[in-house]
Image: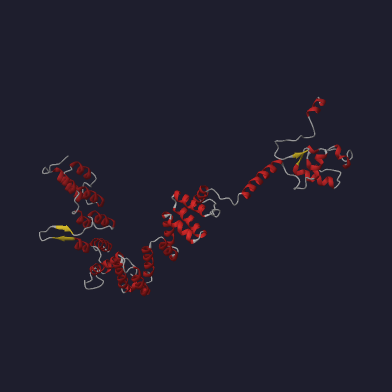
Amino acid sequence: MDKVGYWDESEVKGFDFTGEEYSMCGIKIRKTACLSQLIKDGLSELPSAFGPEMALPGPKEIGVNNLHEVFSEKSLDAIFDADNPSVHVSSISTDNENEELRYLRCQFLTRWDTPDVNRTLTDAFLGRPHSFELFKSFSQKQELLKAAEKLHDGDLILKVVIFLSKTLKPSLFHRILRGSPLASQHYIAFLFTKNNDEYENILAMLGRFNDAAIRQFTVLSNNFHKRGKLQNFTKTHFETSKDKTLVSNYIDLLRWQEGIADGKLLGESVSSTLSFLCADHWHEQKSSKLSPQTFVQTNGVYDKLYDWVAFNARAKKECWADISSHFIITSWSGEVRLKTDLSVDNLINQLCKLSAPQEVVQLYLQFLDSQEKKIEVAKKIKLHKVAIDGYVAMKDKQGLLNYVAYLNPNSVDYKYANKILMGSDIRWKS
C-alpha cells in the first residue's frame, strides 16, 4: 500500500493555471524575488517561509553550483530577474498595454480631425465633455450652427453663437446672424442683459434701427438727471417717427414723477403711478395734480385701465363704499346698473380673491345674466339665499332639493328653502 500511495503523492506542486497568483516551478511569483536574493547572497539554507510546496534538497546534498541540476536555465533566469519589475511583465498586462497603446496612438493621430457634428452637439446638450474648437473653417461653423438649430434648444444655440462670435471676424459673424433669424434672436436676448453697446450694434447691423433707438432711449430714461441727452436723442431719432407722441408723453410723465413723493415714482409705469394715486390720493380735488382723474386726463389713460386699477387699489384698502360709488349708479327710476366696460365675472372673481364681505359680492351678483354663474359663485362664498333664489328662477326643484340637503336644518336659509318647496305657486320644471 505504501508503494501505491507513493505514486499518488508528490512533494512538488504543479503549475496551477486557475490560481489567483502566477507561480513558477511551484513558487509563487511574489516569493521568487526573495528566493532570488537568497541565492545571490550565497545562502545555503532556504527559510521555511516558502512552505512545503517548495521543498528542495538541503545544502549538504546540493550546492549552489549544482542548481542547474534542479532548475532549468529558463527558470533560473526568471528567478534571478524576479526582483527586477521592469523585466517581468505578464502576458495579460502586455495585451492590455498593447490595446491601450493602439487606442492612444489612434487618439494622437486623429487629435486634429474635425469631430462629428451631431455627436459633439449631443455631448454639449447632455452636459458631457465637448469642444467646438476643432470646427475651424467657416463652412464647418455654419454646419455646426445649422445642426444646433435643428435641435431647437435655445441654450445650445446660444452656446454655439457665442463660440462663433469669439472665433470669427465681425463681418463673417454678422453674415451668419443675418442668415439665421433664430440664432440672432437668441443672441439679441442674451445681449439685452449683458452688453448694451454690442446689443445696439447687432440691432443696427440687422437693420432694426427703431429697436436700437428704443433701447438707447430706455437707458437714457433710467438716468433722467441727464435729461439734456434724452431730449437731444429724442429730437434726433424720433422727430419723424410715429412714436414721437408716445415718447414725448413719456418724457412729460418723467418730469411729473420727479416732483412727486420725493421722486420715488420716477421711472414707474403709468398703471403703477395711477395705482399709487388711487390708493393714497383718491379724494383729492380735480384741481390737484395728485388727483387720479386729473392724471388720467393728462396722460390719456383709457377708461378700462382706469377702472381696473382703481377697483384693485380701493379694494386692497377695503374701501368698498368708494368702489360702489364709482361703479354702481342708480337712475331716477330706481334702476341699478353697472357703469364700466369691465367684465362682471372678473370683478366678482377679484372680490373673492381679495376676501370681500359677502354683502359686497352679493351687490355685484345681481349684474350677472346667467343664473348658473350666480349659483356657482353663491355656493363658493356660501351665499345660500342667493343660490336658493337662483334655483327658483330656473324652476329647478331637483337642484334645490339637492342643495337643501347640505344645509343646516336649523338655519334660516333651510327654512326659507323649505317654505318655497312646500308652496304651490311655482311651476317646477322637474
- Residue 173 rendering spot, x and y as whole percentages: 47, 58
Identified at 83% across, 43% down, the residue is 46
Q: As displayed, is residue 297 above or below residue 84? A: below
Identified at 72% across, 42% down, the residue is 90
Q: Is 392 displayed left or right of 12 in the figure?
A: left
- Residue 175 rendering spot, x and y as whole percentages: 45, 58
Q: As displayed, is residue 191 above or below residue 386? A: below
Q: As displayed, is residue 384 above or below residue 15? A: below
Closer to the camera, 189 or 335? 189
Q: As displayed, is residue 351 above or below residue 408? A: below
Q: Is 19 displayed left or right of 225 in the figure?
A: right
Q: Using the rendered view, name the quadrant where residue 39 is placed.
A: top right
Identified at 38% across, 70% down, the residue is 220
Q: Is residue 322 visible?
A: yes
- Residue 364 rendering spot, x and y as whole percentages: 20, 56
Q: Is 245 displayed left or right of 36 in the figure?
A: left
Q: Give the quadrant of the C terminus.
A: top left
